[in-house]
Amino acid sequence: MMNLADSAPVTNNLLGSEADSQRTLYPYVTGTSVIGIKYKDGILFAADMGGSYGSTLRYKSVERLKSVGKHSVIGASGEISDFQEIMRYLDELILYDNMWDDGNSVGPKEVHNYLTRVMYNRRNKFNPLWNSLVLGGIKNGQKYLGTVSMIGVNYVDDHVATGFGNHLARPILRDEWHENLTYEEGVKLLEKCMRVLLYRDRSAVNKLQIAKITDEGFTLSEPYSLKTFWDFNAFKNPTLGAEGSW
Amino acid sequence: MFRNQYDTDVTTWSPAGRLFQVEYAMEAVKQGSAAIGLRSKTHVVLASVNKASSELSSHQKKIFKVDDHIGVAIAGLTADGRVLSRYMRNECINYSYTYESPLPVGRLVVQLADKAQVCTQRSWKRPYGVGLLVGGLDESGAHLYYNCPSGNYFEYQAFAIGSRSQAAKTYLERKFESFMDSSRENLIKDALFALRETLQGEKMTSSICTISILGAGEAFHVLDQETVQRLINEFEIVGEEPPADEAAAPDAEAAAEAATEGAAPDQGAAPMDI
């Protein structure tokens, strides 16, 4: 199954760096932060729908939250094409799991650790999947939420985020997250974080989705946008009194 | 079974549609010393008779821990059993490494069966000459499976394989309906009684039996000799009839006390027994 990952590069000293053209060196189309939190009935994720091409906000309908089997959700930031590749791996994993047809199923913990192995192995071959992933879910009432980075760093927590979300959203969550958030409270908390990211992250776009997973199943909201307020005094006449301004 | 012209290799069918080499492999299982398994909703007990080939030698290991949640008891060519146990341990450890989760026993058993099937369809191989009683935990509870040299596998409430296993099966057939809700202690007790049946009157001591157990919240482990001897004494197995139900037990207890005093722990132990 892992052979899909990368075929052996053509190594031939006469042609030199042809082997290098097979490795990921930099990302091209990227998604920004994903945030995930545990709440009373399960897990809530939020991510915007932007796919940036460098500094251009090029694609605005990229779904960065996907369900994985019956019990898990994945959110990805980083290279979108690598996320699509990861989804192929996961769909295959779920397919083989379903084919056993034996009452056992892979839960979020198994998916998270499988992804960790994939990401770390790719990192060791200097050909990473350029993503930071958030993986969460609930199985038999047990909630699970974790993250994996492109170098294979993995951990679990009550709230996780990728990229800028770590710097802007986690501090808010550390103060305001608690067990037994209701669905409404959870969404409000995520929106608060997403609003800060919208103001402060240049790769954020104002079109987001919320994903929810509970024992009943997975739902993905229709895309919507947040209300923003730009009428701050500090934003009026920003160059007033600045060096060289008039 | 008698020799005939269709039994030379495993890839030859007989006109009656049989693969004699596979059937001969199943005979090898019947020649091995007995192994028994039983399960409740939450526990699986595997037990085996250990016959040393002489008083000077130690006995062969017939029960293997495969993982915390899976154990296997074998009967037949123990060398084949050892190799398959290593395969099972490898599969479990690889799964655990990738998924940080225990391999469901139902899936391991299918992999084992597929591996056995390969040997029934290659001209340069022979079937494994060992039957495996695999006990383990799954999402849906405790399970007991029997894997054949033929590549078939079956799930059981209780089963016995090896020589004189029919006597144990007869005992288990009488009692199996109560096993699902059995307590841990009663399950062990029934295993000991079933094992006793295969001894056909021979003195039952802890030096010739091995008992192992696994369950929800209890990792697979083999019970040590003192525990087993104490259980044997407690359950008044030495020379006594098994109680038909709980009520009969207290009466037998007083009578058996005196009889079991003489069963010293080292009696009948081969010199190399640890």
Image (cartoon, coloured by chain):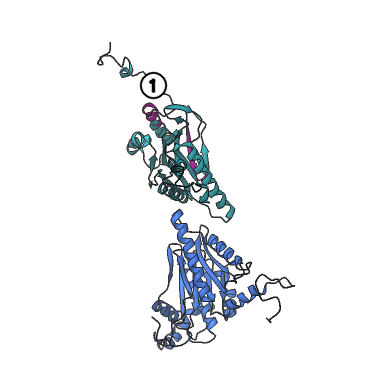
Chain colours: A cyan, B blue
Task: Give me the chain letter of mark 1.
Answer: A
Location of residue B7 in the rendering, given as x and y in whole percent from the top left corner: 67, 76
Mark 1 residue type:
Phe
**Residue closer to the observer: B123 or A65:** B123
SS type, badge 1: loop
Percent position of residue A18, x then y: 46, 42
Quarter the C terminus of chain B occupies: bottom left
Above-or-below relation of A80 to B117: above
* Residue B245 visible, this angle: no
Question: Up-down: is A31 above or below B162?
Answer: above
Query: Which quadrant holds the N terminus of chain B?
Result: bottom right
Q: Position of residue A136 (x, y in %)?
A: 45, 44
Which of the 4 quarters of the picture holds residue A25? top left
Residue marked by disc 1:
A229
State whether residue B174 is above or below residue A5.
below
Taking the view exactly as shown, the residue that stands out farthest to the top is A246
- Is B169 on the left or on the right of A77, as rendered? right
- Give the magenta part as a residue range: A194-216
- How many numbered badges does the structure rendering display? 1
Q: Residue at x 70, y 71 (%)?
A: B13
A206 lies left or right of A105:
left
Q: Is residue A225 magenta?
A: no
Is B110 left or right of A72, judged from the image as shown? right
Residue shown at the point (53%, 58%) measured from the top left? B140
Residue drawn at point x = 45 percent, y = 57 percent = B96
Percent x, y of residue B71: 48, 68
Rate crowding at label 1 as few (under 14), some (14 to 19) or many (20 or more) other CA atoms within 10 Å: few
- Examine the structure image and report whether residue A198 is included in the region drawn in magenta: yes
